[in-house]
Amino acid sequence: MNEVDNQEIAAQFERIAELLEIQGENPFRVRAYRNAARTIQNLPRNLASMVAAGERLEELPTIGKDLAAKIREFVTTGSLRKLRELERAVPPGMRELLKVPGLGPKRLRVLRDELGIRDLAALERAAREGRVRQLPGFGEKSERKLLAELNELQRRARRFPWAEAEALATRLLAHLKTARGARRVEMAGSYRRLRDTVGDLDILVSATRDNAVMETFVAFERVERVLSKGRTRASVVLDNGLQVDLRVVPRASFGAAWHYFTGSKAHNIAVRVMGVRRGLKINEYGVFDQSGRRIAGSDESSLYAQVDLPWIPPELREKRGELEAAARGGLPRLIERADLRGDLHAHTTRSDGEDDLATLARAARALGHEYLAITEHSQHLRIAQGLSADALLAHCDAIDALNQNLDGLRLLKGVEVDILEDGALDLPDEVLARLDLCLGAIHSAFGLSRRRQTERLLRAMDNRWLDIIAHPTARLLGKRPACELDIERILESARQSGCALELNAQPLRLDLDDIHCRMAREHGVAIVISSDAHSARQLDNLRYGIAQARRGWLEAGDVLNCLSWDALRARLRRNR
Ligand code: DGT
Ligand code: CA
Ligand code: CA
């Protein structure tokens, strides 16, 4: 079993050398680790197999007794105590600084000793103020380069909306499948768990020739730079700043590796602990019994079976009670795209949409929808060309007329009415009463205090014509944080009044989020999953909503637009 490859061991030694150097350790010791790292990188033989065969590592050049022991420690335990100690001893700010390309330990020490720089923020400030260029060995050009690297580092630190990563992930998977010898190519990590954002992409490959896979990987046209490339793992940064980690694993370990690299980390650790209680060792190579024999791990189900659990959908693997639920046979029957029978939120050219009523209707019918609610904005939202009461009623006549000529799809007359700052709705009750349904939403005064924002929504829900609160927290991923709200109070009030809450499926909204969906379900508050389409193409947003709904443990029975229109109408608050 070749668990650990030489490049990994070399990287550990290189890291130790860096941290020792920052601490101002004896240069002789630092060099010993560096020399050993170089020896290992160029070694034609696999160290893990040498350890397994009981060979004497001490006989390798530059590897003394101490380093030989460390290699054995890493091969057998997967980590080094020395490195863990150093990681703890060196302040996090300094470790962050080490990630800046071109900043080695030596230059870092100059920065720290001369300018007191101990973290990225301090470095950026000093560079902007032109203080770095005055240091020996730096100069104006390297100061400018440092600022550019800092910029790049920040670009990489951001999380990417899932949907933004999707196009790249799909193309990269297709590209990797063309590699000679590639058998299976799968996404892992938060991408597979369908989190609303991803920090990076993790891809797992089983292959008969790892070399060809690595070469194909780094040759992907969108790769901007290669961070590392070993025999079984590699990392690259794409031209939009998204990092991608790739692992190549043997086929017999595929399930165990897929489980490991899908995460979440907290879920993995909990499963591993369940294994320990049964005398089993679970890692990314498989499930091993006490004699070290591999007893499972070629697929994920075999791994779960060893700890007496059914297979758990990746969306639930967050250590939020899924293991306990699985153990008692109580996993939810997660909602699927095919459970949705219609869509309750869409815009046409009449307010801020791109397609007209007929185009949208045709597209909805092609998707198999039984109903589609047309919900233009109300007047208060001027930038979206919101409708006055008269304009809205005229639009309703147009919808009625089109309905006469539609087969198999029913258009519903709705509105997305603004919830004003004091909680009043932007249209009179007599107008709202004439619609099939009414969504209410916040589009202004996002920064109110928690108390006032909560009261704003509670007051809006006092109006019996308000059926659904659309995108309740108004967050926009990467652009605007969620409004401050007392969600518990809002859920309680929604339960009492029968008002439903929306899971808005626009990929930058996903609002309610997974955790709030789960809370809604537990409070007995109905959810609707809506595309909020502003074009025919965006009707397909629903699949992003389904992903978050599944992460929120929702079943079809929790979601109103899994019902036929007749059943749904009876559940709307106005008709109760
Ligand atoms: P991200 O990238 O921040 O959106 O989140 P993930 O979950 O994709 O995290 P990432 O890319 O750092 O690692 C991928 C998976 O690898 C993670 O979900 C679980 C596994 N993993 C990473 N580090 C550890 C670890 O130290 N222990 C265990 N048990 N699993 C780990
Ligand atoms: Ca990841
Ligand atoms: Ca990763």
Image (cartoon, rainbow, N blue to C red):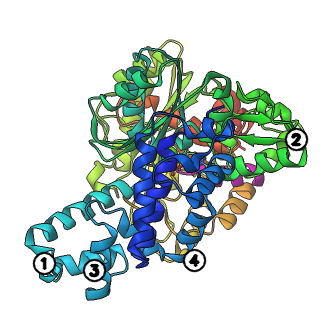
Q: Which mark is residue 111?
A: 3
Sequence-first tag of 1 and 3: 3
Report the residue marked by disc 1.
133
Give the CA distance from mark 3 to mark 4.
Answer: 46 Å
What residue sits 53% from the left and 69% below the top? 87
Among the two numbered marks 2 and 1 on one chain, the one whose residue lies closer to the N terminus: 1
Residue at numbered disc 2: 327
The percent coordinates of residue 351 (x first, y second) are 31, 42
Residue contact between numbered discs 1 and 3, judged by CB atoms under 8 Å = no
* Labels 4, 2: front one: 2
Give the answer, above or below, for where 67 lies relative to 506.
below
> In the image shown, does 573 or 199 lie closer to the viewer?
199
Tell me, for residue 451, which label it has, or none.
4
The correct choice, above or below, for 53 with respect to 274 in the image is above
Q: Quadrant of the image for the N terminus?
A: top right
| Marks 4/2: CA–CA distance | 40 Å
CA gap between label 1 and label 3 equals: 11 Å
User: Which image quarter: residue 95?
Assistant: bottom left
Name the outermost residue toward the front: 59
Q: Quadrant of the C terminus?
A: top right
Q: Secondary structure at mark 1?
A: helix
Q: Nearer the viewer, residue 56 or 320?
A: 56
Q: Position of residue 88 (x, y in %)?
A: 56, 73
Name which residue type carries label 3: Leu
Q: The residue tagged with tag 3: helix, strand or loop?
A: helix
Q: Earlier in the sequence, mark 4 or mark 2?
A: 2
Q: Amino acid at mark 2?
A: Ala
Secondary structure of the residue carrying tag 2 is helix
- Horizontal arrangement in the rendering, residue 14 relative to residue 53 (left or right): left
